[in-house]
Image (cartoon, rainbow, N blue to C red):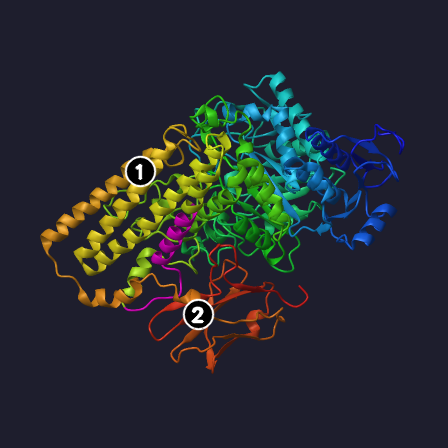
Amino acid sequence: MFNGTPDSAAFPEVILVLDRHDPLASQASVVWAAEQLSEALKERQIPAGYAEEYIPGSGAAVQIVIAGPESPLVRSAFEQAKVNLPEEAEAFAVAASPGLIAASGFDARGLVYAVLELTDRVRLAENAAAALRDTVSFAEKPANRIRSVTRLFACEPEDKPWFYDRSFWDGYLTELAAQRFNRFCLALGMGYDYGHDPDVRDNYFCFSYPFLFRVPGYGVQVAELSEEERRRNYDMLQYIGEACRRRGLHFQLGLWNHSYEFTDSPNMNYSIEGITPQNHAEYCRDAIRVLLKEFPSIDGLTFRVHYEGGIPEPAYDFWRVVMEGTKDAGRRVEIDMHAKGINEELLKVALGTGQPVQLSPKYWAEHMGPAYHQAAIRENEFSPPDHSTMDMQAITALSRRFTRYGYADYMQDDRAFGVMFRLWPGTQKLLLWGDPEIASGYGRYASFCGALGIELCEPLTFKGRKGSGSPGGREPYLDQALQLPNRDWMKYRYYYRLWGRLLYNPDADPASWRRYLRQEYGGAAASCEQALAHASRILPLVTAAHLPSAANVVYWPEMYTNQPIVNTGASTYYDFDTPKPGTFGASSPIDTALFYRVDEFADDIVRGFRRGKYTPLETAGRLERLADTAEIHLSQAARETQHRDAPAFRRFETDTAMLIDIGRFFAAKFRASLAYALFERSRDSARLEEALRLYKSAADSWRHLVSISKDVYKPDITFGYTPHVRGHWADRLQAIERDIEAMELKLREAKAAAEPADEGKLAAAAPFLQDSRKKERMACRHEAPDHFRKGSALDVAVEVPDAPAGLRINLHYRHANQGERYRLAEMSRTGDSFSARIPADYTDSPFSLLYYFEAKDDEGDAWLYPGLNEQLSNQPYYMISAAGE
């Protein structure tokens, strides 16, 4: 502690006033945060010291008081600065006046955030002393109760280096806490889908317990694992948990697999001895008891309880026994169940433990889309009418199929469990991502229908999955100058900063991320922000509009395995999960309410009408605008930077340029696919020539992407052992060129046949081929009700000023239950106002209501309202809850 006197010449420039008797300031996590601030001051060469109480007339430039809200000095400082500390968990406030900064929080975690915010400003400010001196009073509170990151151990040779590296954990977990994530999950056994994986190879940590400890009364062990390594695993898990606790992070352990034997896997490298079907459930129960006793830092356990966790469905008796292991932990232990396949009986099993229970459904299947929750699921996700068979996946694949890739029917307002969304890593696994607008949107909609928040699968999740890894860590770069050995997370610091801070506060001050960009990119920071923001919207839009597979182990648009436009009858990787005939035009969007399939749009317009959904042309137009805008800012950044050869800028420039090429590829391919679909319906060879020209343009964009990446990234980047989740962008060219050759053959055949075009269909389609943005210009006004009353009809009205005479508007509505389809009501018109009624018997349900409008004019144009904004960050429908909810 600093023990100087006010007239001492040795007084530091900054005094940290940390009263160890204060109930919050004495917490270990707050003391740790104060140490971080002290270290930051030291790094910036600002003399600093500690004191246990405020020292009047100290001579220091500023004294930073770190205390709880009951501190008289904090209360006085807040009153003087007119700052109110929100009375909510994890809220914090900072009051500043000449010579004094008072930092406080509603609880210890809030106080940690207050101190780490000051730390961040000191570390990143151009003039740290001035940044402290010029601090302006402010207060913040969290929008989401859970803001989590999960990191997966999926590959023994690639993941052991970081897992055993204590300095890795020190830096990584500090970054999470500094960016206001409040939870970290270490996921074990998540790399395989044991219900249908025929060849398990690298199964390290897959049946986790015997890799960590022995359970008294059982002779269960990993045959090939030395006692020394088992003990090392035990010690590391202790270290990780304690490091989380020191930083105020909730520590969640993911136990995704409970299968110990893989009979179809002769290449499995670890075998479990001493466990049988007779003692399986009891061993797991007692292992959980040992786990929770030996590791008091574990705050919760995540289970995958459907068949992919290795236990055939239904398995109520198995899980009832296993979860008994949490009952006598002597503390609160959160039970998080991956939501796929959960039914009422499984919920009863978990709730019967007396522990808090939450479900974690997927946000956009196993991918990432725009910020909102998909307005409608794919047709393939609705449960088939006949689902009586009870086999290994009876619940997940049949009776409750609609639970696989979204929030399903879990959002009842009377639920006895929490809901947390999980954002999976299918869309983007590798390249940089950073868009404040979309991250802010997720911050708003992660609490959809009272949900608790969101867990992100961190970048590089599933790297080396399913035995595809190689020794030496997760490093994807071929260029050694760009490598970050055992520190891959540092490439994504901007990603973590945006997600953490905007999930905490969707309206966060942009200064909180721009100061980082200024330090990283200097005078090019503003251009870098805009370039990456626009480029980062490309893949979420592609995902929403084109989803040949919901599985991240199949569809990877970032390194896209080409889905053909031309149907040659050949099978593709996507056949099991995409509509027949498996072509790009037949592929479903993930959001079937808002986006057209290419073939669906072509079918409509050749008959002379269209619906309000976003067309392939509109999607292509958005992608082109995003790519063009990103390129303008990227070029500007290259001119503005003084360090173009610096590794950080090169990583940024390469990835952003690659995303731009991906956007242009998909824009041209959407257009080419539509032109080809119109050829198929009209036999007009001119449409086929147009499709071929556009497809060649798409291929040129992909070739440029290859040229950018070939000397930067390794030739085989593996997220699995099958071709579509490993390799390099260059590997994908052959399939694109093969499809172009098939289209060229079709053109030769069409010209040889000289079949007359169907002019009627061409004429009917022509008005809809203009890339119109009319619907974005027409003004609509709607005031959503604050709430509705269950069992009472709900009147909904929308006004269209100067509405044309032929305008018609339909209301689409459904419960916040993805297992249901929308109902449609034609709205009646009075002047410029349109109204419809949602019936009383429909509002009498445990769900909130979702609705949107579809307008059609007498010229045949149609559009949706409210629709998506240009940033893809809004909710394109209205959601209202019942009164009192």
Using the rendered image of the protein, determine whether residue 322 is visible from the camera's viewpoint. no
- Disc 2 target residue: 778
Contact, mark 2 vs mark 1 (Cβ under 8 Å): no
| Whole-percent x, y for residue 446 in the image | 58, 52
| Whole-percent x, y for residue 501 in the image | 62, 46
Q: Which region of the structure is painted magenta? A: 608-630
Neighbours of disc 1 within 10 Å: few (<14), some (14-19), many (20+): some
Residue 707 vs residue 370, the one in the foreground: 707
Relative to 351, is 13 above or below?
above
Element under disc 1: helix
Residue 605 lies in quadrant? bottom left
Using the rendered image of the protein, determine whether residue 254 is visible from the camera's viewpoint. yes
Which quadrant, please, contains the N terminus?
top right
Relative to 172, is 509 above or below?
below
Neighbours of disc 2 within 10 Å: few (<14), some (14-19), many (20+): few
Q: Which amino acid does the dot numbered 2 rest on? A: Met
In the figure, is residue 12 to the left or right of 539? right
Element under disc 2: loop
**Mark toward the start of the polypeptide (2 vs 1):** 1
- Disc 1 target residue: 703
Relative to 75, is 412 above or below?
below
Is residue 5 in the magenta section?
Answer: no
Q: Which amino acid does the dot numbered 1 rest on? A: Arg
In the figure, is residue 718 to the left or right of 106? left
| Whole-percent x, y for residue 67 in the image | 81, 42
Residue 109 lies in quadrant? top right
Q: How many marks?
A: 2
Prevailing SS of the magenta stretch: helix
| Whole-percent x, y for residue 792 in the image | 60, 75
